Amino acid sequence: MHGRKSKKHQLMPGGAVQFYNDPDQLVEHLQLLIASKQAGNTGVDNEISAILDELVRTGAIPKDLVVQLNRSLVA
């Protein structure tokens, strides 16, 4: 349908965007996204990549691991 917008923001109370300050929270969310992707959800690739980028930016995981994960998860 033309002009239809995603309703993802409605999943959060008040339509707020959730931010994760703790790398452990990012990893937990990443695990949920990976499970969602394995269940057939094809719309999570950008969010998976963004979390991996944030984890490497904060020094939580090395860049070479992110490259490997991106290849296996988002490909």
Image (tube, rainbow, N blue to C red):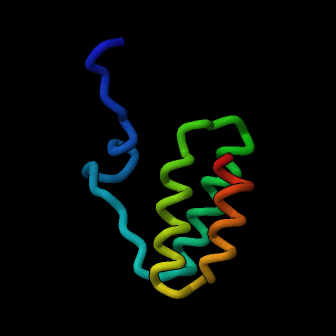
Image quadrant where residue 5 sits: top left
Q: Is residue 25 left or right of residue 14?
A: right
Q: Residue furthest bottom?
A: 59
Which residue is pictured at 53% across the width and 78% down the height? 56
Residue 22 drawn at (x, y percent): 47, 82
Q: In this view, does 5 lie to the left or right of 40?
A: left
Q: Check the picture and name the quadrant holding the N terminus.
A: top left
**How many numbered marks does the figure carry?**
0
Which residue is pictured at 54% across the width and 38% down the height? 43
Q: In this view, does 45 lie above or below 2?
A: below
Q: In this view, does 8 lie to the left or right of 25?
A: left
Image quadrant where residue 39 sits: top right
Residue placed most toward the observer, 1 or 50: 50
Which residue is pictured at 55% across the width and 67% down the height? 52
Residue 54 drawn at (x, y percent): 46, 73
Residue placed most toward the observer, 7 or 3: 3
